[in-house]
Amino acid sequence: MSFINDNLYAQVKAIFSKNFLDLDFLPDGWKTGNLLDIADYLNGLAMQKYRPKDGETGLPVLKIKELRQGICDASSELCSPSIKSEYIIHDGDIIFSWSGSLLVDIWCGGTCGLNQHLFKVTSNNYDKWFYYLWTAHHLDRFIAVAADKATTMGHIKREELEKVEVIIPSKCDYKRIGALIKPLFDLIISNRIENRKLTALRNTLLPKIMVGEIDVSDIQL
């Protein structure tokens, strides 16, 4: 599954580069902007202030550790599920860690609460592939900026999002390019979600098989 997604992402990047990064001139109807022109970057909450209330089943908290490993686990902190809906993360959401370990990724680790130092990236006007790829394109610059400012933990300020250039195509060309990229991008997301669910199923069943709670002797391969 990882090999398949690596191949899909390579195709996505190639299409993106050809249509946006390798341009000799700006086509008619196209314009330049910055990251804040194409997406909203919502900072998370200080989740220690939003612990589960009595009787609530807590949501795992998405921190940098969880983002790096791609899942929440038994050591993940919990928050109240009654936090505002915009701070609840679902599969397929784009998350950008702007402090400490800078990275941007598609979250496919299940429902959780967004902790501070992470941006949830959304847009009312553009698809996920568009603002994800532009954010990822500028990640090395952000890492360099954070390294220059680092004392104990490097970070970038929101104003850095305004300093980087993005190219915004005409509506017609956006639709044309999106028809190439979006199906591949959506397939990457669905593959990652399926892989997580299969891994969880394996982790649940394997110990039971090992101790004989589940009889597989009659299964023919």
Image (tube, rainbow, N blue to C red):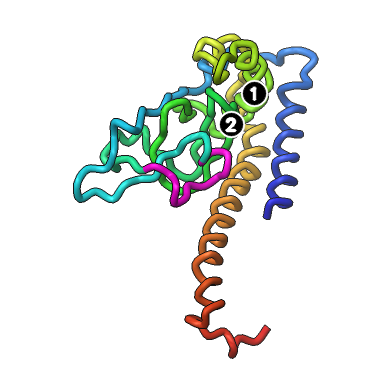
| Extreme residue toward the front, this view | 152
Which residue type carries mark 1? Answer: Leu
- Residue 11: image x %, image y %? 74, 40
Residue 139, label in figure: 1
Q: Which residues are magenta?
A: 66-77
Give the residue number, with chain letter if any, for mark 2: 104
Q: Position of residue 68 (x, y in %)?
A: 57, 39
Of 136 and 152, nearer the camera is: 152
| Dominant SS in magenta | loop
Q: Which residue does the image show at 73% across and 26% down from the upper left?
A: 19
**Marks 2/1: CA–CA distance:** 8 Å
Tell me if I can see residue 64 in this picture.
Answer: yes
Q: Residue furthest bottom?
A: 218
Magenta stretch encompasses residue 176: no
- Residue at 59% from the left image edge and 50% from the top image edge: 192
Residue 202, image x and y in percent? 55, 66
